[in-house]
Each structure stands twice: as C-alpha cells, then as structure tokens.
Amino acid sequence: MPVLLLSADGESPRGTPMPESSPRPSSDWSKSPRLYTMKDETGDDAAQLPGMPSTLDDKPTTPEFKISVAKPRRASQVESNARLFGWADPEEIKKKVLATSLVTEPPYDVFHFYWDTGLFQWLAKHWVFENVTLTVICLNAIYMALDTDLNKPEMMKSGESNTLLQSPIAFQVLEHAFCTYFTVEWLIRFAAFRDKRNCFCDGWFFFDTILVMMMVGETWVFTAVALSLGSSARSPIGNAAMLRLLRLLRLARLVRMLRSLPQLMMLVKGMLAAMASVFYVMCLLLIVTYVFAIGFTQLTAGHELGAKYFANVSVAMYNLMIYATFGDNLADFTNDLRSQMWPLLVFCLIYMSLAQLTLMNMLVGVLCDVVSSVAVREREERSMSQMIADMKLIFASLDKDFDNEVSYKEFSAMIEMPEALSVLRRQQVNPLQVLDLADLFFFEDGEPIQLRFEDFIDVIMSLRESNEAKVKDIWHLWVQYRNARRKDVMEQEAKLQEMNKKIERVSTQLSSKIDQTSAKLEEKLVGLLGELRQVPQPRSSTPTPLSTTSVAGRHASKTVKAEAGSVRKVTSTVSRLVSKRSDAETKERQ
C-alpha cells in the first residue's frame, strides 16, 4: 500500500528517517484540470493529493495518507504550494531571515579583557573598588568648587586663584591625595588587562588615561618644573588661566557615574534619542520666527518701535525669541506695542500662540514621550537581565546533566522553589498559568521534550500579564490550533486505516468462505447428478406416490436453496462493509 509522507525534510511524522525501502517521491508533478497526482521515481502515479477530487474506484487498495505534525516550539511546517511544487521552502527562507536578523554581538564588558586570576583583576572587578572610585570622583568635584572659591588671596571674591605652591597646606595635601588615588586606580586597571593593547579598545580607560595624564602633569610635573626654575608665583607654561580651564576636564569623570546610576543613564539616552525630534522642532520655530521678523521689520519701518525692537531682521528675530518666545519682560514689550501700534499687538499674539504656546509645548511633549519610551525600554532590559541572571542561578542548582535544557521534571522542581516564584511575580507572571500551559511546551505528540534555557526564558516572558496581543500571538494561536487539528486528523486517519485493515481481513475471509462454499456446493451438485443418473427408470407405467427420483430432486433443491441463502447473506454483508468504507473515505476527503 503506497504511503505519501507530506514532510519537507524527508522524515516520518515522528521525526525518524524514512526507510530506504520506502518510495521517496520526487518533485515531478503532473497537473490536470481535475486531478493532481505526484509521480514517484519510476514516473508512475504514486498517490493522490489529499483534498483533491478523486477519480479512483472503490477498491480496497486505496492509498493511505500520513501528515507530519509540526512541533509546537520548533519550526512549524506551514503547508505551502511553493514547497509542494519543489520551489523555495518559505519556512527555510524564514529560518535564514531570522538567523540573519537575530545575529547580534554580545554586550561589551571590559571584564572580558581582564585576567581570570590575580590580585589586580580581583581589585578591578570588585564592587567596593568601583564604589570607592565613584565616591572619590564626587569628592573631587566638590573640592574643585571649594578650591575655586577659597583658594585665592580674597576668598569668595573675584580674582586669580593661587598656584599649587602658593596654596595653603590643606589644599596641597588634598590635591596630591586626589592625584595619587587616580594614578593608583589607573595602574590597577592597567595591570588587570591580559593584553595591554586592549587598553585602547576600552573607551572609558582611554578617557581616564587622558585625564590622569593631565592631572599628573598639572600636579607633579609642572610643580617640579616650577621648583627647578625657582618660580612659585606663576605657571611654568605662562598663562595659568588656560591651565585652570583644562582642570575643568576633571569634572568629566562625573560621566562615569552614569554607569552606576541607571536613572541618569536613562535620561541621557532619552535626550540623545530625542535630538532629532528637537532639532526639527527648533528648525520649525526658527522658520516661524524668521517669517514674523520680516513682517515686523517691514511694518515698523521709520517708526520708533522699529528703531527700538525691529531695526533689522536679525535684531527682530532676537527680540521675538527673547520677549515673545521665552517670555522675558513680556509685559513691557506688549505694552509698547499696544500703546504705539496696537495692530502689531495682534500680530505678536499670533506669533506667541504659534511659537510659545504650540511649538515650545510640542517640544516638551516630544521630550517627555521619547524619554518615557526610553525609560520603559531600559526598565524592560534591566528587568530581563536581572530575571535571566536569577533564573540561571536557580537552574544551575537543578541542571544535573549540564545540558542547558529544561525538562518538565526540572521545571516542576523549579516552580516549587520560593526564589523562582519570587522571580516570576516580579516579572508579572502567574505561576498557576505557567503550570496550566506547561503541557503545550514540554510535550509533543504525547511525548516529553526539553527546551533550551533561552527558549524557556522566551516562554516565561511571553506569559507576562502585561503583554499585549499582537499579530505574532494570533499566528502562534493559529499554529497551535492547526497542530491540534492535524493531530485529530491523524487519529481519525489511524482509525480509518485500522477499519480498512479489518474490512480487508473480513473481505478476505468472506471471499475464502464463499469460494469454499461454492466448491462444496458444486461437489454436492455433481454427486446428486451422478446419483440421479444411476437411478433406474421404472418399466411400469403405473405412477407411484413417491418415487426415488422425486425424493432426490427435492433434497437437492433444498440444499441448493440453503447454500444460495448463505451466499446472499455473505454478499449483503460485504456490500454493507464496502459501503461504510466508501462513505468514510468520502467524508474524510471533504
């Protein structure tokens, strides 16, 4: 009995390779207006496609069809005409596209360039060392403000600050202490690198290198040069003001705090993401101001207002931005317009409604929208990272075989742990719903399967109560419904196949019985005929009430009628079975 396996990878529905003896259909298809068949390697019609019109007669050798059920958590085989005709498989194209789009570089971490063992790498990676460095950076920023206000001949007044040699001893000690700490911190991080050339690959380290070199040069090198030259009143490079301006770069170390304060980093990322929108809003504001500046300049030509506020286009744009947009001393500006040329006040109010009320509020709205979007994304990323880290620790204690795959047994043990329940609740995942849906993820065709840890995390995140339904979710629902329907179809086909086998067995048995009964009947008829020929004819013409011939004839007639009734019963039984099988096949095709 030929079997057609509708599978794109040449495997059976259970995923086992097809035996070599099974006919492997090729992609040679013949098409007619009413019948679609697939040819095997010999060129003969192997089987009829399911769902197509049938032209076969009702014979017990009806082809048997098996449909491979797609895996729920793996690549689902979607029926496609392109694959049926031997063209590019859409599922394979999807796999290639996903493989290309999902290839992302791992997140950068400078710790990957450090030694795995040793004192310096241990110090550089320790959280206490990082927090102490951030504290020293904050103290240095406060010290710079105190040095600017107090380290001068007249404190808290405008004037030139003292050089390091002229400064009081407290300022000198603090300056050398900060310079020493930042130098030691740089040396520890430098010694932690396995390959010293990777120092130039880390942007933060390169940035700190420049700041430390400037600080060492200002604090120690220039001081040593000044002492050697015998000049403590002025800088050895001449203009000390330029040197003090360079000291402001020390405040750039505060940028390092962004790595430890996610809220600040969130705001900075929001501002950077909103730069394009802010630029376009400012361009629109500039265009509106430019148009109104030309109008005000032309309308106030030769008037006192023109000489005061709108002498030319550039001055008019400046005054409109300061007075009408930013609202600085707006009352005096509008009173002058009202008292001297009241129509210009109406013109100014129109500009204010566009620039101050519309565009500026639009700018605030754009910033709020972008920052909130970035904040949501950052929180999601941090939440995802934290959940993955926590679940890895929990899963590491349960993964006895170290295969990085989650089985139903491991999942059951995990869901009973208080730590796992706490992680799920933080992610707004209901553990009871996860248990109810576990059969969809850990079982296929009634057999247990295992999920990769990454797929398990994806399943957990997809079950969050705050998720919104999207087209992808509808598609997954349709795939699960289709797979369940295919499973039911396979069960019905299995029942039909079993029924076909039973009908064939019964038909074979009935056919053999009919043949045997017919043979026996023929033998009996032949024997009766022989007996009739051997009976002698009576010489007397007197009729007898019951002759031997009539008795033998009646006996033969009864035997023939009984055997004919048996044949009719067998024939009617076979007809009913064949009719039931034909009806079942017709319903299945429909």
Image (cartoon, helix red, strand yellow):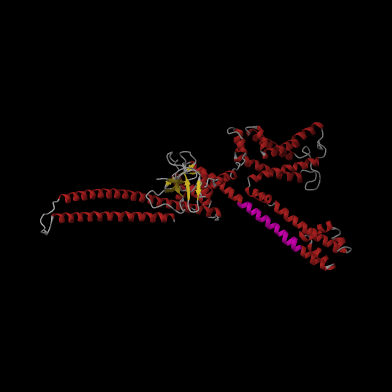
- Relative to 410, 572 lies left or right: left
- Relative to 171, 194 lies left or right: left
The rendered magenta stretch, by its main secondary structure, is classed as: helix
Q: Nearer the viewer, residue 271 or 225?
A: 271
Residue 182: tell me if it is visible.
yes
Image quadrant where one finds the C terminus: bottom left
- Relative to 76, 157 lies left or right: right
- Relative to 567, 446 lies left or right: right
244 w.r.t. 440: above or below: above
Determine the image quadrant of residue 234: top right
Q: Residue at x 61, y 49 (%)?
A: 378
Q: Residue at x 79, y 67 (%)?
A: 346
Q: Nearer the viewer, residue 538 or 185?
A: 538
Q: Where is residue 88 drawn, in percent x and y?
A: 55, 45
Say whether residue 36 is magenta: no
Image quadrant where one finds the N terminus: top left
- First to last magenta residue range: 352-376
Q: Where is residue 548 drawn, in percent x and y?
A: 13, 54
Q: Nearer the viewer, residue 573 or 371?
A: 573
Q: Where is residue 351 drawn, in percent x and y?
A: 77, 63
How many tags in the picture?
0
Q: Where is residue 561 drawn, in percent x and y?
A: 23, 56
Determine the image quadrant of residue 555: bottom left
